[in-house]
Amino acid sequence: MNGFLYSVALQWKLDIRSKSLLVTCYIVPLIFFLLMGGIFTSAMPEMKNTLIQSMIVMSISMGAFIGLPPSLIETYGSDIKKVYTANGVPVYLGLITMFLSVFIHLMITCAIILLLAPVLFKAALPAQLPIFFLTLAIYIIVSLSIGSILGLIIKNQAKLTMIAQLVFLPSIMLSGIMFPIDLLPGFLKMIGRIFPASWGYRLMLDNGFCLENLWYLIFAFFAAVIVCGIILKNNEQ
């Protein structure tokens, strides 16, 4: 157990020095929040009630789909994974430590948004903070599990960048965080429901913690765990 905690702490320190994760988990999400927070609340004053959830969905999507996968490629797309095998270390350890490390980074970013939004933009705080943090943790875990699939299954960095954008952009544009989802045509609403962002957004809203908004995220998480397990099993061979 001590060895596992040490691995997580070491990975977290390494990720702090990673320019890619620094940009995707902190710099870009927080700059987007600072710039767009004022624009959104000025153009749509009613968005003060959902600004925190909207900015958090964007931040998590970027960190999970664009930040985590390149780190996984560095390990599982190179000879580093052979080091795990040669030293008798389970091949899944790298995935777990990176997963937990990015989870912590995204939690920190979300906490910053939660603290600054009411001060800078008079955004409304969630009515029940304990439930909000629970739903936040669920959404981060599900998003990272999907990002893990991208990092494990795609071995080419250029291809990963393109596919990650194909997951990230619809997650943002079709989830309802940029504008009311009712403005979208029916077929785009259906496409938006494929991505976890729309479900996570609704889950984090006040009174949104219910099975209706939770079931898809649970399904997506277990499906992602199974896929990651199969991929890692093949990597061992």
Image (spheres, rainbow, N blue to C red):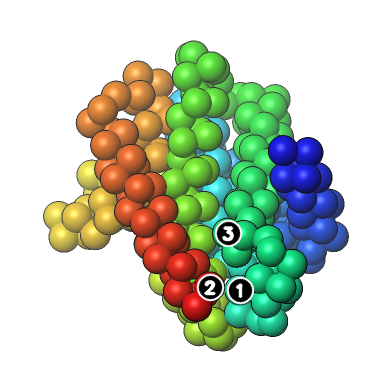
Q: Which quadrant holds residue 98?
A: bottom right
Q: How crowded is mark 3: few (under 14 residues within 10 Å), some or many (20 or more)?
A: some
The amino acid type, in three-letter code, at marker 1 is: Tyr
What kind of element bears circle 1? helix
Compared with 126, 43 (above or below) is below
Q: Name the residue under label 2.
A: 236
- Which mark is in front, 3 or 2? 2
Mark 1–mark 2 distance (CA, rounded to whole Å): 11 Å
What kind of element bears circle 2? helix
- Which mark is in front, 1 or 2? 2
Question: Outermost residue toward the top?
Answer: 128
Q: Residue 92 carries which label?
A: 3
The residue under the point 59% across, 41% down is: 37
Q: Where is residue 101 in the image (x, y as percent from the top left)?
A: 69, 48
Q: Residues within 10 Å of mark 2 (few under 14, many from 20)?
A: few
Q: Earlier in the sequence, mark 1 or mark 2?
A: 1
* Left or right, 117 with reference to 148: right
Residue 198 seen from this side: no
Q: Which of marks 3 and 2 is nearer the N terminus?
A: 3
Q: Which mark is residue 184?
A: none
Q: Earlier in the sequence, mark 3 or mark 1?
A: 1
Q: Nearer the viewer, residue 73 or 26?
A: 73
The amino acid type, in three-letter code, at marker 3 is: Tyr
The residue under the point 67% across, 77% down is: 82
The residue under the point 40% across, 27% down is: 205
Q: Name the residue under label 1.
A: 76
